[in-house]
Image (tube, rainbow, N blue to C red):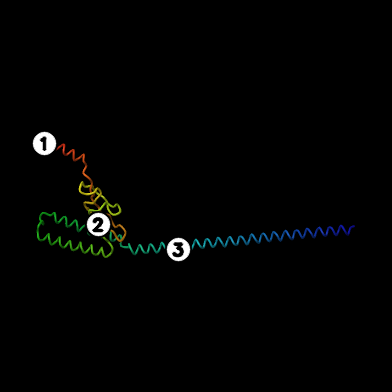
Amino acid sequence: MEKEQNQNTENNISEEKKDNVEATEVTAKNDNETKEKSHEEIILELEDKLARTFAEMENQRRRFEKEKEEAYEYGGFAFAKEALSLLDNLERSKQILSNDESLKNSESLKKILDHLDIINKDIISIFAKNNIKAIDSLNKKLDPNFHQAMMEIEDNNKEPGTIVQEIQKGFTIKDRLLRPSLVGVSKKTNHKDVKGEENKENLKDK
């Protein structure tokens, strides 16, 4: 009887050990799977970070290339813009000399103006070689991308918004605006003003 009880006890202990071993193995297996999954996740995260880093490096490279190209293409932008003042000063000098009563119709004035025209043409030629070109404005429709309207001029022979006067010539460098043309644009005569003038004339006649 005692032997049977001892045998049963031993069997129970063996089964408990077996259960514990199996439970431990299952836990260990689950832990291993968790660890393996975590490693995979870490690898995926690292791959994602690496891909993002490469993408950012590529974007920076492209930005650098673009900036380098723009620096090459438009490196003289500021200088060219400043150089336009030479043309403006030449034009002002011509106007001042032409309006000088003491020089009007003189041979000296003609020679000076001829020389100024030669200098002006040389500057324009140098600009053209460097892709700096004057904007064609007169008799063109006003384009806000290239023109800046400074005044309106009544002209019934032109469509409203047509450029009829160029105050200051504008320029472009390649496809970029260097400075806009300052212009005067046409507008239709105000009929009320015309009628008012006619009424004034009629009153004067009476």
Tell which residue pokes out farthest to the right in this image.
1
Mark 2 = which residue? 136
- Side of 21 where 160 appears, left or right: left
Secondary structure beneath label 3? helix
Kindly identify which numbered label has been placed on residue 205.
Answer: 1
- Residue type, label 2: Asp
Q: Quadrant of residue 22?
A: bottom right
Q: CA distance from mark 2 to mark 3?
A: 41 Å
Tell which residue pokes out farthest to the top in this image.
206
Q: Quadrant of residue 101?
A: bottom left
Residue at image position (20%, 63%) is 121
Q: CA distance from mark 3 to mark 1?
A: 83 Å
Specify few, some or many for label 2: CA neighbours under 10 Å numbering under 14, 14-19, or 20 or more. some
Image position, residue 38 (x, y; %): 61, 60
- Side of 131 where 21 appears, left or right: right
Kindly identify which numbered label has been placed on residue 23.
Answer: none
- Residue type, label 1: Asp
- Residue type, label 3: Glu
Kindly identify which numbered label has been placed on residue 58.
Answer: 3
Secondary structure beneath label 2? loop
